[in-house]
Amino acid sequence: MDKDNKENTTYHRPEWDENGQVCYPTTLQPSEKNHIAVCLKPPTKVIPVIFLPGVMGSNLKNAGGEVWQFSPSSLGKWPTASPEKRKLLLDPKTTTVDDSEEIFNEGAEGSKFPSRRERGWGSAFYKSYGEALDKIQYLLNDDNILMDNFFRDSQQKTSRQQFIDVDLGAEKGESPLTEAEVDHSYKFLYPLHVFGYNWLQSNADSAALLEKYIIKVMGDYHGRLAVNKVILITHSMGGLVARHYSENMGGQANILGIVHGVMPDLGSPAAYRRMKTGERGVIGMIIGNNAEKLMPVLAQSPGPLQLLPGMAYGPGWLKIEDNGICQSLPLGNPYEDIYLDKTAWWRLCEQDLLLDNTENEWSQYETRITEIVKIFIEELHGKYHPQTWLFYGGSAEYPSDAFLTWKEENIPQRVQDELRRRREAGNPVELSPLRTHSLISAGTPGDGTVPVTAIRTTSPCIQAALAVNVDHEGAYAIDPADRSRSVYSDLSDALVFTVRSVVKIVQQVTVP
């Protein structure tokens, strides 16, 4: 209908009532005027999108109200916390998800969807995800621009329309969006939810909770769903949770597709480094910036341990230079060669740092590795949802740990003499103040945490794979890390790829 030739015609935008249903406020007109009210119809069918944060990306709390999050109070109290206090507060058995974090741009969708807090946004670290979640939601629900165009003389392109024909240079599955694909994507609405989970517990336990969450989300949109499935977007460890639910728990039937960001597919030696030397940066100030503070926490936490390299990572990622002798481990089995070794000074877990320092404590750790960590890692290997799309950090600008080296530093002659006397006397040379070694990163391409060698892109289930220039924590940052290398000047390639992947995934859904 040509609005310019219809003086008695008015056009009405849709509004959403408190139940998420479309309504049209109109004004009554005298019948003799033959007034015509045209109600512009928006998409109404919903395809929920659920974001899974990475390790340390969900806020936690315990019964005492102690909260793990990037709040001013946390930054003030955690750096001085003792190893004993960290172990007590960051216990996977006593912590739960806290959803009280700040939310960026709360209320932006009005009554179109449940509130952002109801959709779980408060469970994610604001510092890492606050603005990124807002941008992803905007990019997936910018259909209001199409509505606004009806009242404009010049038409404005939506973000998705601007992505048409953009070539990202994916190493696998590069396929720019077509106009038809983008048009089809506007047949649906995409409310973004966040599944915060306890990253200290086993990822298998988190996957079981994900199943319940997905069922709840689909129930919340009963009667509005375009298809009885959701789309998952994951960050780091969240990808392992999603894959376990999808491939080992029969969750495929509830998932339309998965977009993974910087997922440590084969595990990462960085998990070993974190255990032995603590975490880096601001996060390290909170969770622990040395082995004495962090090892007691990680040794009792299956989730972080499940980020260790599995059998598929291959041998030789831990190199040891000791008294002129070089060796590379694991020879074949990292569980036996490194994770469960109790005596070698370069072992993963040091019993004397577990605080209790008892055989029972070590026994619990051994059980955790053999019955929870190993089984999870090895059973997940090579399994992906049939509609898998992934991006990963592949830049030399973010040096990563493809392998690690314990390098012996220059030792004073008196110390060398003492070491020689010990060896000649038949005494074992243990890790002690007499020994000086540094754990050196390989500095290989990656995202600063996950090296390129930890990424698998050859599975037929992986529809597209893109190497991007991102650091691990900021993988979903809005702005490009390097605008000169980004194909889209105002957004990171990772975000463009994520939105493009969602558009490709929804091509499976027919319009009712």
Image (cartoon, helix red, strand yellow):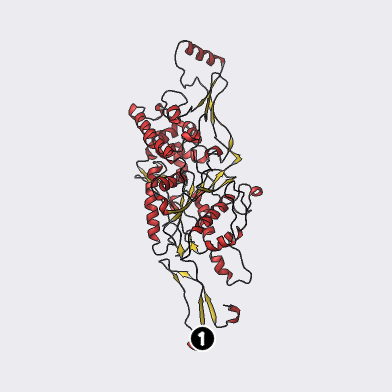
> What residue appears at the point 47 percent right and 26 percent down from the top-left corner?
346
Q: Residue furthest bottom?
A: 32
**Which residue, as the protein is rendered here, is positioned at the far front?**
460
Judge from the rendering whether residue 478 lies leftward or rightward of residue 224; answer left or right.
right
Q: Can you identify the residue that label 1 sits on?
A: 34
Who is closer to the viewer here, 300 or 206?
206
Q: What percent of the width, then of the height, locates residue 85? A: 39, 36
Q: Residue at x 47, y 74 (%)?
A: 24
Tag 1 secondary structure: loop
Q: How many marks?
A: 1
Q: Position of residue 168 (x, y in %)?
A: 61, 51
Whether residue 300 is situated above or below residue 231 in the rendered picture: above
The residue drawn where x is 56% and y is 77% is: 1
Is residue 382 or residue 169 the one in the foreground?
382
Q: Is residue 491 above or below residue 445?
A: below
Q: Residues within 10 Å of mark 1 (few under 14, many from 20)?
A: few
Q: Is residue 157 visible?
A: yes
Residue 136 screen position, x and y as percent: 52, 55
Residue type beneath disc 1: Asn
Q: Quadrant of residue 287?
A: top left
Toward which corner of the image does residue 405 lie, by quadrant? Answer: top right
Residue 385 position in % (x across, y down): 46, 48
Among the 4 quarters of the image, the one containing residue 155: bottom right
Q: Is residue 129 above or below residue 112?
A: above
Determine whether, in the image, residue 208 is placed left or right of residue 2. Answer: left
Could one spot residue 58 in this view of the protein?
A: no
